[in-house]
Amino acid sequence: MKKRIHIFDTTLRDGEQAPGFSMNLDEKVRLARQLELLGADVIEAGFPISSEGDFQAVREISRQVKNCTVAGLCRARKGDIDRAWEALQHAEKPRIHTFIATSDIHMEHKLKKNRSEVIEDAVWAVGYASSLCDEVEFSAEDATRSDINFLCEIVEAAIDAGAKVINIPDTVGYAVPWEFGEMIRTLRERVPNIDKAILSVHCHNDLGMGVANSLMAVRNGAQQIECTINGIGERAGNAALEEIVMAMQTRGPEFEEEITINTREIYPTSKMLCEITGMQVQVNKAVVGLNAFAHEAGIHQDGVLKNPLTYEIMTPQSVGITSNNIVLGKHSGRRALNARMEKLGYELSKEQMDEVYEAFISIADKKKVVVDEDLIGIAPNGVSHM
Ligand code: KIV
Ligand code: ZN
């Protein structure tokens, strides 16, 4: 049997932290309900100490969401942990997620603490959080720029203190896949109690490698992936949930692991996020972009009309999109034009089709996309049109 990878969605926390992506209470609850339909294993609903609004959102999501674990973020401080627990306590499956930075640069310049003080804070925070909540996740912020020996030490101490999930964030999206995979393998090999916790990864996308790093981590023993819808998140964003899920689904035999996401809810979830935030994804965005299942070039259109698998590695329906999109433009061929004319109800002879094609190319050279109204305008008079 394949090992199960847990999908931890942090759209409502790390995603929302990106400039321009703030959501109000109702919007966060609506999206959380959709994430539940999508089948996320964990929803990180917010950072309760950060604002009254975030506190209320985490509390409301905890009350309403029944089928996912609900997590709330907090620093390794009593006030943060108490506030997170206050918001989470009514959840069916609550999780306190506490973190502290472990890289020298963060410890020296941001925390102004040395390594033993940071370990002490982490152990205390995990122990205290575990006295309130059965499930505690510990994150070593900026793990990928941390000393590996120190990272092993703090991970072991956090597990001894009661952490059920250990998260290794690539906070600044600095890692490259082979190095990140190696880091996960090293933690698995060198931390004696590592099997007592779920090993998680959280990758940012500053170098565009969030998804690749996450998959490499899975290959090296990670059991949970933290990600966001549409890849939203701080700076260049987080690893995109839809890309991770569809990579694992589409390339199934490549993975010894599986995920249990309801992939048909991917597109509706992506659209809902766009609608709530007013932020669209770029057209060429993998899986959910406008062009992800669109074909304009004649050779591709011909192939797809004969068999979609020629140029589509997954079906649009598998991610909740009704159908692919044959776009007519200057690169399009006769076959796609003919198919569209037939769809519009025109039965054309070969000669008529030649004429229409000429007219079509001349329009296509002037505009980016030729639409149905343009075709109706160039159809020969008297041709049957249903
Ligand atoms: O990127 C990061 O390090 C985080 C942690 C708080 C998990 O978002
Ligand atoms: Zn993050």
Image (cartoon, rainbow, N blue to C red):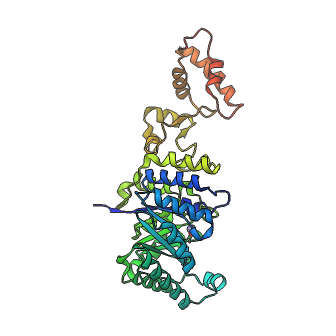
Q: Residue furthest left?
A: 1
The reply, left or right, for residue 362 in relation to residue 301 is right
The residue shown at (47%, 59%) is 63
- Closer to the camera in the image, 336 or 194: 194
- Closer to the camera in the image, 316 or 182: 316
**Whole-percent x, y for residue 287 in the image:** 51, 48
Q: Is residue 358 above or below residue 90?
A: above
**Whole-percent x, y for residue 73 in the image:** 53, 70
Residue 208 appears in the figure: no
The residue shown at (48%, 49%) is 266
**Whole-percent x, y for residue 198 in the image:** 39, 72
The reply, left or right, for residue 276 in relation to residue 223 is right
- Closer to the camera in the image, 229 or 105: 229
Displayed quadrant of residue 133: bottom left
Q: Is residue 325 above or below residue 78?
A: above
Residue 225 appears in the figure: yes
**Whole-percent x, y for residue 344 in the image:** 54, 21
The residue shown at (62%, 81%) is 106
Q: Residue furthest right?
A: 366
Q: Is residue 20 above or below residue 119?
A: above
Q: Quadrant of the N terminus?
A: bottom left
Question: How many marks can you see?
Answer: 0
The reply, left or right, for residue 193 in relation to residue 31 is left
Q: Residue furthest top?
A: 382
Q: Quadrant of ligand 2?
A: bottom right
- Closer to the camera in the image, 89 or 8: 89
